[in-house]
Amino acid sequence: MRRRVRRSGVTINAVAGNHVVMLGLNIDNSLRRGLRGFAIRRTDVAAEETFWMRGQKTFKSLEPTPAAGEQFSSREHPFQSFQWSDYSAKPDQEYTYEVIALYGKPAALEERHSASVTVRTEPVVGADHTIFFNRGSPATQEYARRFLNKWPSKVGQAAYDWLSRGLVEGICDFIARAKNERWSLKGAFYEFQWPSVLDAFGEAKKRGVKVSIVFDDIDNPTGPHQKNEDAIEAEKLKSVTIPRTNGTLMHNKFIVLSENNKPRAVLFGSTNLTENGLYGHANCAHIVEDEDVAEKYLTFYEKLREDPETSTQVSDYKHWTIEQTPAPAKKFSNGMAAVFSPRADLDALGWYAEMATAAKKGLFMTFAFGMNEQFRNVYSTDDDILRMGLMEKEWNGANKEKQIAAIRKLQARPNVVIAVGNRIPLSEFDQWLGELERITGHVNVHWIHTKFALIDPLSNDPVVITGSANFSDASTKTNDENMLVIKKNKRVADIYLGEFMRLHSHYAFRQAVKIFLEQNPGKSPDDFAQRFLVEDKDEDWTKSYFDRDDRQARMTRRLYFAGDS
């Protein structure tokens, strides 16, 4: 849901997903002088509960020694930013946000200009699309506050539930929709291991449901084949699983739900069925209630169960995926078109880059392993379009330093903001709470595992590209993958954008800390982080937000999220 209001020189542009409400703020230039920041008061309409939203930064003159992790009312210590998000919102709830511009001395702040907006968050379950994002951020101050920075395996179910935020439950509920022998569940998974989800398949089998899952059993040193085999044996699911032994990487994660041999819905996304995939790094599962799309995925499953060969010079399978799902798509079903890999060429990657290049105001993408050259070219375009990126790491494969340098060059552009996953390391004197690096033992991905692109998400014609494939050559030409292109669906775009910004805001700060510590040996996060609000009357905290050349793209972001670009 979107709603934009302007009153008394204050603009609020609210965008509500299901767990996140974003507020893009603006203020007339004539009202900037002496602005101390914004207080935000939230009212939960149904609960009739009103309170001031809270943050961690304080006026030093009022609170010089905040306790580690302590939060403060924005009425006393306002937000000095033109973008703010509520990450504590609940699905399908109505909220009113009052934004108040504060002036005067920190000890006696005055309310002068205000505006308010009322929005309803999206329900998680939708008629056509149901989307689950886990929290994907064990490296947070909130996790440390709640669970004292202990691994969830040491805390118990409460920690897992908080990290899942409905993702695991949503997958199990989808499986539970198959009631009896009239139903089937057919799909494919790269990592097929987590007990509670495998138990759900086992229970479906007991109900008479026709269950059939293709899993990666390709013999390579880094693959999950042995762990998959062990989990399948432990859960007694060998009779309903099919090993995929050919190919390079069977990277799919999808389930097709059918009734009386008629496909009804498909669940897909980036989530592997492992502890780290479900609870650790950022992931999503997306359910589409569309028979044509589900039919397309079922056709893909039928091909995968044949264990097609991909290593030959001319692979029939790679041409089959192009015939089944041409790129650019020739036909859309309710605004959706699937794209399957591996393919005989890079047509799909080129189509994604073409759509990204066509963005008129905003582009938002996640990159788990480096950034492909085609997208580095998109992000380096000379214009005023806001381009944001979220990365697990800046490089992949050879030429690590060269790739990192290329990302640093992009980050210096005034309309580009790229965040890279990281955590806050501590010294014994820091006033930050300790943060987990991971939730379990050895992991290949720590932070960002989602694979999606948002093209002009706040427009009336947004494009969302989402699925299992990284935006890379290998994911296009080598691996078994699936993606779905979704056009003109504002609800889907709003949900994805809120989750993107939640993760981006979190990791942008942590990456900045990491770079500072690398460049300043012996320093700590406290030396980098401006933990205090600007209160010198001669220092204008708003200046960078009105500077077109600001290297953090603050002006570009202010205009875009406030709806003024």
Image: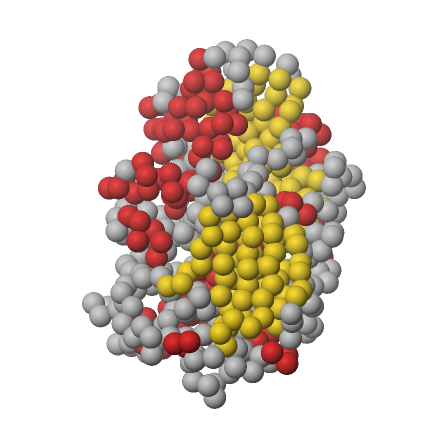
Q: Position of residue 212 (x, y in %)?
A: 52, 22
Vertically, is 330 above or below 501? above
| Residue 130, image x, y percentages | 58, 36
Which residue is drawn at the image coordinates 74% and 37% (left, top)? 334
**The residue positioned farthest toward the left in the image shown:** 428
Number of numbered discs overlaid on the protein picture = 0
Where is 9 relative to 211, above or below? below
Look at the picture and state if 406 lies above or below 243: below
Q: Is residue 518 visible?
A: no
Choose between 51 and 56: the one closer to the eye. 51
Residue 60, x across and y down, in percent? 34, 77
Report x, y in % for residue 71: 35, 61
Q: Does residue 256 sit above or below 164 in this rendering?
A: above
Side (left or right) of 384 relative to 143: right
Report if residue 427 is visible in the image.
yes
**Which of the two residues, 259 or 476, is positioned nearer the viewer here?**
259
Residue lying farthest to the right in this orientation: 330
**Which image quarter: residue 193?**
top left
Q: Is residue 308 left or right of residue 346?
A: left
* Picture residue at 69% right of the left edge, 67% below the top: 564
Query: In the drawing, does residue 69 fall left or right of residue 98?
Result: left
For the point 60% across and 63% down, which residue is it? Answer: 115
* Residue drawn at 27 percent across, 72 percent down: 65
